[in-house]
Amino acid sequence: MHSSDFSDTIVALATPQGVGALAIIRLSGNQSISIVNSVFKGKDLRKADSHTLHFGTIRDNNRIIDEVLISVFKGTSSFTKEESIEISCHGSMLIVKEIIKLLIAQGGRLAKPGEFTQRAFLHGKFDLAQAEAVADLIHAGSEAARKTALDQMRGGFSKDIKLLRKELIHFASMIELELDFGEEEVEFADRDQLKELISKLLVKINALINSFDIGNVLKNGVPTVIAGKPNAGKSTLLNALLKEDKAIVSEIAGTTRDTIEDEINLGGVSFRFIDTAGLRDTTDTIEAMGVARAKEQMEKASLILYMLDLTSESTKDISAVTSDLQNQAIPYLLIGNKADLLTKKQVDALKDFDINFLSAKLGNGLKELEDTILEKVNAKALQTTDTVVTNLRHHQQLLLTKESLEAVIKGIDNGISNDFVAQDIRHALHHLGEITGEISTDDLLENIFRKFCIGK
């Protein structure tokens, strides 16, 4: 789709595929109302006011397909800032397909992924960073992720970028003016002021770049590996945390031969819990592959929950495990399972180790463990009110902006010509502009919006 071509009226299912009570089909484009009106029996939609609902039937000639509720959006007051219709029908996929087929026969065409949001962006409803936040909001898996995506969709991040860009444009224009005067050696842009401004901008940009680690956690969750010897209770812990039987629990050592992954929310933060095969020496080829994969997962984790079966681990074993985990330099928690089977004397003998006592089977100590996990990943830092970068594309453009701004300072210090200083400032402005879409190409837009779901 070319960025300036809005002559087509696009059609798509906006609700998830599959059977449900209701489904919503949306249209956008200057023929939306006339296309729907030609198959709708009820009020004449051409005479309806914007933002009104109308009950009636969708018909193929005289054959009734479904009873529906039509939402009408006229002029530029819709999500896409063009004439739009939403059809709320019953959630049978047969009905949905028949209605969409009928709308296409009347002159509509199937929308491409993200085309509704792309039209909203191209009509100036919001900038590119806000448009990308729409997809993040849809896929938000935790309260923290929702808040961050909503703030970005409402323009919090964009506002910061536009302010940075505005301050830089002033000096860029002064240097461009100097270039216009050629060899007359007039100076409109005070170099010390320019260096001071860029130093301030770099502080802000570095803060945004550094926030990406937090942003990545908010968006994708904390990758957390549950590791330990076979039959230590890893799968039981995962099920207790998930509050459902997702993993296979068996008395036979070596039951889990692959990684099992699921996502849960603790304290508004999303955790991707990965249950792995038991760590032990084995001659079973398939189990050995599972053990190797478990070690790979541990190396990639942001947090390791190491399960100890307190009824079978010696203090020597626990010391060896602690030493290995410390060498990995990844945050970890030692979890002592089956604590309900220990005597007080046995518990006291373990007081030199930092063990979180638990009975995964009974659920004893589970709430305390959840609190400790949140402390370990510094969950309070994730509840930040500052602007957080969650998008890899934005992070890459900020790194390029930083590189260009550092080149400006270096150039001024080395006394290079105005042409090169101006060029480095232009590069910085370009990278900032690519974040918000003030500078964009059709290729860039296609790449971004094709990752959206169809109907959004």
Image: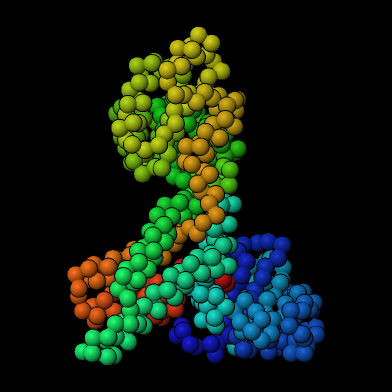
Q: How many marks?
A: 0
Residue at 42% of width from left, 52% of height from top? 213
Q: Nearer the viewer, residue 334 or 57?
A: 334
Residue located 54% across and 31% down the image: 369
Quarter of the image where one finds residue 365:
top right
Q: Please, which residue is most extreme toward the top here?
A: 345
In this rendering, the answer to whether 329 lies above or below 206 is above
**Residue 3 visible somewhere in the drawing:** yes
Q: Is residue 42 left or right of residue 352?
A: right
Residue at (46, 16) in percent of width and height: 351
Residue 203 on image: x %, y % = 39, 60
Q: State the residue in front, 115 or 357.
A: 357
User: In the figure, is residue 398 to the left or right of 143?
Assistant: left
Give x and y (percent) for residue 142: 57, 51
Spot occupied by residue 104 in the image (x, y as percentages of width and height): 59, 83
* In this view, 239 is above or below 61: above
Q: Position of residue 234 (x, y in %)?
A: 47, 31
Q: How is the image coloured?
A: rainbow
Residue nearer the viewer, 444 or 452: 444
Q: Which image quadrant: the C terminus? A: bottom right
- The correct choice, above or below, for 181 with respect to 334 in the image is below
> In the figure, 100 relative to 285: above or below?
below
Query: Left or right: 247 with respect to 425?
Result: right
Looking at the picture, tell me which residue is in the foreground, 172 or 126: 172
- Residue 293, quarter of picture: top left
Q: Residue at x 37, y 38 (%)?
A: 330
